[in-house]
Image: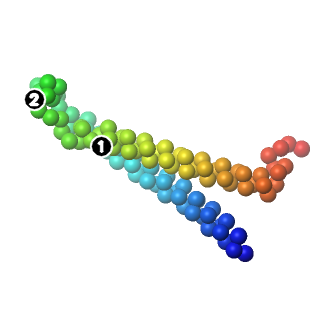
């Protein structure tokens, strides 16, 4: 009975981890989109853009931070994809152990 409990607990943890990483990935993607819009609106234009390009003044913080936020969103999405793939692969291998003929045609 303890082996069954450990197996069930491990599966539930992986399933919960897959769901939570997907939620974090979605939140990071939404934050990245909002930061991108804010950066596009705050980007310097005209003579201000020229002074930023020459290094006389600095770009607004949101313009500087937008690529970093986008990188975090990509990393979160990649982590969520890897965790979901591991969960799918483990489920698939467990189903094949239970019924080895399930995937083959008869």
Q: Nearer the viewer, residue 99 or 10?
A: 10
Residue at 36 percent across and 41 percent down: it is: 70
Residue tagged 2:
56
> Residue 100, percent across and down?
82, 51
* Colour pattern of the rendering: rainbow
> Residue 21, percent across and down?
48, 54
Residue tagged 1:
35
Indicate the secondary structure of the residue bearing disc 2: loop
> Residue 37, percent across and down?
29, 39
Rendered view: 50 above or below 21:
above
Residues packed near mark 1 inside 10 Å, few (<14), some (14 to 19) or many (20 plus)? many
69 lies left or right of 19: left
Q: Nearer the viewer, residue 45 or 78?
A: 78
How many numbered marks appear? Answer: 2
Mark 1 or mark 2, whichever is nearer to me? 2
Asked whether residue 98 appears in the rendered view, the answer is yes
> Residue 19, percent across and down?
52, 57
């Amino acid at each position: 009975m303890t082996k069954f409990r450990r197996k069930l607990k491990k599966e539930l943890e992986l399933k919960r981890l897959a769901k939570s990483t997907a939620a974090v990935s979605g939140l990071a993607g939404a934050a990245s989109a909002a930061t991108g819009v804010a950066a596009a609106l705050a980007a310097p234009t005209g003579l201000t853009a020229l002074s930023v390009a020459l290094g006389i003044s600095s770009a607004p913080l949101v313009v500087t931070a937008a690529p970093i936020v986008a990188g975090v969103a990509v990393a979160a999405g990649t982590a969520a994809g890897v965790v979901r793939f591991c969960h799918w692969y483990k489920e698939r291998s467990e189903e094949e152990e239970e019924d080895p003929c399930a995937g083959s045609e008869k």
